Image: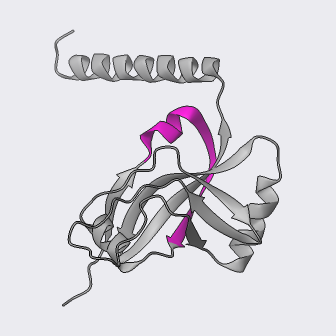
Amino acid sequence: MPREKGRKVVTSNRRARHDYTILDTYEAGMALTGTEVKSLRAGRASLVDSFAQAQGGELYLYGMHIPEYSQGTWTNHEPRRTRKLLLNRLEIDRLLGKLKDDGVTLVPLSVYFNDGWAKVELGLARGKKSYDKRQDLAKRDADREIQRAAGRRGKGME
């Protein structure tokens, strides 16, 4: 069977971009069991309340929910188990240095398959205050209104 090509997104954490300011993004592999991969290929996963954290010089993903595989047997996985993230030692060291800053955390932004390999996109993030969120919403609404006006003008409606 030929290997799949390209990028197939399984799930994304849309709430993360609302709650956090993303400073930098990283791509990491995940150490998964067979039934977890099958469940991901079926498009079943949730990143709600998940986060990445350093433990013993390694990075782990906590709180990610991958439901049990329906055709799995006694070999099925635990849905919310801690999963090890696979990065180069240099990248891990660089991330650990940046995580020492106050108010900075690692948040998973999306889970996808890249050329057949399960990957997670991590964002180095700083939490937003509620007034920052309101400003972002107002800016997005204003930009949307500008696009509408430009579209109407281009069609000769104004």
Is 136 rendered above or below residue 80?
above
Q: Quadrant of residue 69?
A: bottom left
Of 63 and 20, nearer the camera is: 63
Magenta range:
13-29
Is 31 rendered above or below residue 145?
below
Q: Which residue extends farthest front?
A: 74
**x, y (%) of residue 15?**
47, 37
Relative placement, left or right, of 109 versus 118 is right
Relative placement, left or right, of 47 versus 154 is right
Of 52 and 121, nearer the camera is: 52
Look at 36% across and 53% down and name the residue there.
11
Q: Which residue extends farthest top?
A: 158
The magenta stretch spans residue 22: yes
Look at 65% across and 78% down and name the residue there.
88
Look at 73% across and 45% down and name the residue there.
104
Quarter of the image that includes the C terminus: top left
Q: How is the image coloured?
A: one colour
Q: Quadrant of residue 149?
A: top left
**x, y (%) of residue 63?**
52, 53
The magenta stretch spans residue 53: no
**x, y (%) of residue 75?**
35, 79
**x, y (%) of residue 71?**
20, 72
Quarter of the image that includes the N terminus: bottom left
| Count of picture labels | 0
Is 34 rendered above or below residue 104?
below
Q: Which residue extends farthest bottom?
A: 1
Look at 25% across and 23% down and name the residue there.
151
